[in-house]
Amino acid sequence: MVRSHTLDDRFSALMDALAAVRTEGALKQAIERFRADAEAARFHLNRQTGGPIFLALLGGTGTGKSTLFNRLLGSDLTATSFRRTYTAGPVAAARDGPSIPQHWLGVAAVLVDPAQLPARGQPDRLSVVAVDNDLTRQLVLLDTPDLDGDQPLHHAQADRVFRWADALLFLVTPEKYQMTELLPYYRLAARYEIPTLFAMNKAESADVVEDYARQLVSRGEMSADAAAGATGSRLFAIARDDAGYEPSAGMNFQSLRSRMAALQLFDAQTRQRGVSRRITDLLSRLRDQVIAPMRADRQEADRLILALREMEAPSAEVDVNPLMSALQRRMQQRSILYLIGPGRMLDRVRQVPGLIARLPRSTWDLLRGAPSNGDGAAVVPTVESGASNLRTAVTDQFAIVQSRIDDVVRSTQRGRQWADESTTPYAASKLPAAEAARIADEELEALKTWMNQRWNATPRDTAIIKKLVKHLPGGEKLTALSEAAPYLVIAASAVTTHALFGTDILVFGGYSLVTWLTEKVSNEVAGRAHLTNQRIAERFARLAHAQIQKSSQWIDSRVGTAPSLDRLEKLADAVSQQVEGTQPNELA
Ligand SMILES: Nc1nc2c(ncn2[C@@H]2O[C@H](COP(=O)(O)OP(=O)(O)OP(=O)(O)O)[C@@H](O)[C@H]2O)c(=O)[nH]1
Ligand SMILES: [Mg+2]
């Protein structure tokens, strides 16, 4: 008694653990089937002997299950039809509602309104019809959808009733008795020690019934005696309405009906053996169809996550991770240093004397990012075009990171399945491209702000230069300009003096004015631009890392964690050990 409770407790712990495991798709279905069948096994495990016996009619479509059900009960309760796979869900005839324990069959029981009869049944519902007669005082009789039609849903409904039923009546016809669909159910009925009757409906002659009897005996479903139509026989025949044939008294409709009314559950020991086998079968199914595939999935997920992490790891030759090196190459190619580098700009200005007159305006435009309209200056890209180039470079590179992640995820069949079929969309694990664009935009904006501040500031050097500039030809003009852009004056004056005199006339401590100024401006801007590049690279690395994290988490949550699988396995083993170590009479 005590051990039985423990077994049920362990079973229920296993079920709870299974309910908590993350999974989807085919595995989820396998788990749901296991849980449904395990609930049925628990019903049998805890089955008390009192109360009605649940007897299910099972068979192929059109074998006349519904017709026989009505005939047995003497009323049109369940709908029959010449149309195939007609009954859609289980229909129970019970003396009253309370005859059916709550949760029996693991689906909601609904009492059918008499005005709605005959019932056709609904999937995943138990339609209950109340009938009080001699048969329903002993039994709850169940009509089921077909086990052999082309509708898997019908099969599933009938299979569920098979798992829960206390007793079975398999119905065949002369056309169908040789078909193989029922054989697994015959075998399981015997293995699970379920009292089982067999009937051939629409029988037209004795020889086909005898052939069915031979088949059952040769397959070991019953003894020759049980098939002989004598007392205790388990094989019956029901003549087709219009056939001249009449089965022998021991195996006709009336005998079948009396036999059903007198049905008993097997003795406790036999039932316990049946229940042990049910549980053993369930656990091996759990191992084969749930735990093993989940372990494989876990390994797969871990492998994919590792592959994603490796994308970030520094490679042997270069001390940069491969994701970053590509961006850095691109940034070098499109470097904003290259695009707006003041050294280059000043060089250019120096080479084109015609530019001198326009120098302040075009240089200003160039550095501020306004579209340059001067003929000479147009050849040098502006910050704006540099910005959009850089934004494209960063977003393109991020798209490359994402597609490389894609390649890893889709490198295996399971990964492809997850990506294509997951209920948590794979696309949702992708960070928006706008985040990459934002990095470039924000950092360039910061650079521009810095440049404006520098150019508008009046550094100490500027004051000196202003004094010098006064003494140069055209100096007044430059002084006026210096109000708007003090730093610019440095560049302008440097170039002006250089261009006009063709030689470096001013020397500070060994440096020519030109060299000193261009270097100063150039170094400062170069330094800040370099910082911008660095910041973009850092932020990009963080974004790529965040994307890899997010993708890894998405993969990780496709399947249960290793500890949760270990726990599941342990719980299954505990149930197994209990079933194997328990003597049959200790189970109930
Ligand atoms: N002539 C004759 N027809 C029968 C007999 N039993 C059933 N039928 C007919 O066979 C057809 C199918 O019968 P059903 O009782 O609906 O068959 P079912 O096994 O419930 O079929 P599904 O619900 O599709 O699984 C109906 O047209 C019935 O009238 C019988 O003994 N003789
Ligand atoms: Mg039917």
Image (spheres, grey):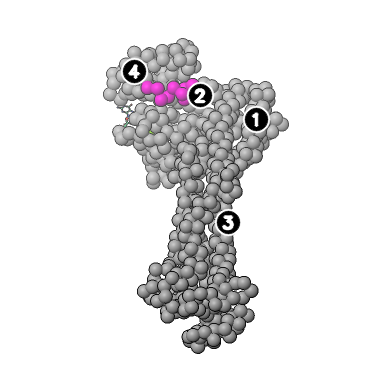
Q: Read off the magenta span.
A: 179-189
**Amino acid at dot 1:** Asp
Q: Is mark 1 within 8 Å of ligand 1?
A: no
**Amino acid at dot 2:** Leu
User: First in sequence: mark 4 or mark 3?
Assistant: 4
Residue 183 drawn in magenta: yes
The residue located at (36%, 32%) in the rendering is 149
Helix, strand or loop at label 4? It is: loop
State the CA–CA distance, disc 3 to disc 2: 59 Å
**Amino acid at dot 4:** Glu
- 101 is higher (above) or lower (below) than 400: above
State the CA–CA distance, disc 2 to disc 1: 23 Å
Q: Which mark is residue 573?
A: 1
The residue located at (58%, 85%) in the rendering is 467
Mark 3 or 1: the one toward you: 3
Labels 3 and 1 touching (C-beta < 8 A): no
User: First in sequence: mark 3 or mark 1?
Assistant: 3
Q: Which mark is residue 188?
A: 2
> Which quadrant of the rendered structure holds the C terminus?
top right
The residue labelled by disc 3 is 542
Mark 4 or 3: the one toward you: 3
Labels 2 and 1 touching (C-beta < 8 A): no
Farthest residue to the right: give it: 2
Helix, strand or loop at label 1? It is: helix
State the CA–CA distance, disc 3 to disc 1: 45 Å
- Work out whether residue 116 or residue 359 is closer to the camera in this orientation and state it: 359
